[in-house]
Image: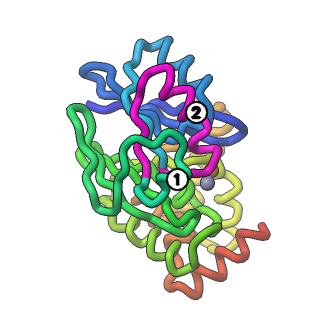
Amino acid sequence: SMKVEIIKCLQDNYSYLLINEINQNACVIDPSESKPIIDFVEKKNINLKFILNTHHHHDHVGGNNELKKKYRAKVIGFKNDKDRIPEIDIFVENNQTWTNEDFEAKIIHIPGHTSGHICFYFSKDKIAFTGDTLFSLGCGRIFEGTYEQMFASLNKLKKLPIDTKVYCGHEYTLKNSIFCSQHEKNNKNLEKKIFEIEDKLKNNLPTIPSTIGEELACNIFLRAKNLEDFSKLRDLKDNF
Ligand code: ZN
Ligand code: FE
């Protein structure tokens, strides 16, 4: 079976190790920097085989170079981003299943934050790495895409099974929760989730993973009825 280890990086980034518990072979998802990954891999005798990048931003690929050099791990990224993902070895595209002896992930192209943003969805274990597109209780800023694209990308993620675990790129959950509660009153599910978030943070624990089901119930960006409502919320959040 697969295990996910959460590794804090930089200010508020999360990198993740997806570990095949049978042989300790692992993928790292979005290594912001190499040091915390190396420390963990060495301590736990993990075999780092693959580096998976959801998008090309520096806080998601900063560790590529070092990790590839040290472990001869292969870098996997979106085909159209081959010129801006450092050290890329394997190009993937929308709807492709990326597979090997240890891992199998469906690639879901989810543009908006960047034009080449992808989600790695490990369907057997119902684990989704959503990068800076879907956050817990939020969504990413639209840097390269349109509102339409981001809205469509979130709609793709909404269709994953409700018990899918969501691992995103940043610990933004508390601030996101304040925005959600300001713009949707009397959401009991949200109130309950905020209680849980505060408890985790108080104990110095990540608020991640969330689930698709919880996000459907609480995340105002997934609850927006249409593109117009979504776009208004996205603008408000940019200045929040
Ligand atoms: Zn980003
Ligand atoms: Fe980021």
Mark 1 CB near ligand 1 (8 Å cut): no
- Does dot 1 land on a helix, a strand or a loop? loop
Direction from residue 17 to residue 32 in the image, left or right: right
> Which three-letter amino acid code belongs to the residue tagged 1?
Asp
Residue 158 left/right relative to 147: left
Please report contact status of discs 1 and 2: CB closer than 8 Å, yes or no. no
For the question of whether residue 77 can be seen, the reply is yes
Which mark is nearer the camera, 1 or 2? 1
Q: Which residues are magenta?
A: 54-77
Q: Residue type at mark 2?
A: Gly
Residue that mark 2 sits on: 63
Q: Is residue 131 above or below residue 31?
A: below
In the rendered structure, find residue 83 and report the number of the disc placed on it. Answer: 1
- Image quarter in which the N terminus is found: top left
Name which of mark 1 and mark 2 comes first in the sequence.
2
The x and y percentages for residue 193 are: 55, 54
